[in-house]
Image (cartoon, helix red, strand yellow):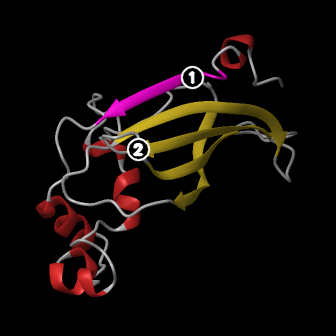
Amino acid sequence: MTMLTEELRARIGEERVYTAPEELGRASIRYFARAVGDDNRLYTDDGYARQWGYEGVIAPPTLVCETNQYADVPRDGDGYAGHRWDLHVPGTRQVRGGNSYEFHRAVRPGDVVTATWVLVDIAERSTRDGRAMLVVTSRAQYTDQAGELLATNEEQVIYVSLDVPGGDR
């Protein structure tokens, strides 16, 4: 079964750009840190952050990568409103393949973040049990209002066929 159609192959190289509509605020930084259970004082205490060489509080590193806060896209069927490629791969289930982050500079209150995503590759593979799958690789660069690189993210999403070779779904 060939899953990598010409329509999907033509999407390789596609780019999406999302820019936050406003500056990142201290409250967002504090709420995100609480939501992920991180009580590091770098995110809430200016004096403490200055002791570590920052100008004041900074954001938890992965906050910048949560494009749902500024992507301005409609919610999908699962309620998610962040970046996605909306690839149509019938007869599959979608599985997160993982992310690889590299952080270049701490994000601070007042930064306006832009995320630029590129669909880098779609590769056809097989699972150990012989099911077809597509491995979709994309990369994002996150920059601030001056174009300074904040972080990069390589992400893989896997579409696994529901058809089991020699068996039923």
Q: Quadrant of the C terminus?
A: top right
- Depth order, front residue of 140/83: 140
Range shown magenta:
12-19
Image quarter of residue 161: top right
Q: Position of residue 95 (x, y in %)?
A: 59, 48
Q: Position of residue 20 (x, y in %)?
A: 25, 38
In the displayed structure, 9 sits above or below 131; it is: above
- Give the residue type at disc 2: Thr
In the displayed structure, 93 sits above or below 151; it is: above
Overall secondary structure of the magenta section = strand
- Callout 2–callout 1 Cβ contact below 8 Å: no
Q: Residue at x 41, y 51 (%)?
A: 65
Per the image, the residue denoted by label 1 is: 88
Q: Quadrant of the N terminus?
A: top right
Using the rendered image of the protein, determine whether residue 80 is visible from the camera's viewpoint: yes
Using the rendered image of the protein, determine whether residue 45 is visible from the camera's viewpoint: no
Per the image, the residue denoted by label 2 is: 143
- Give the residue type at disc 1: His
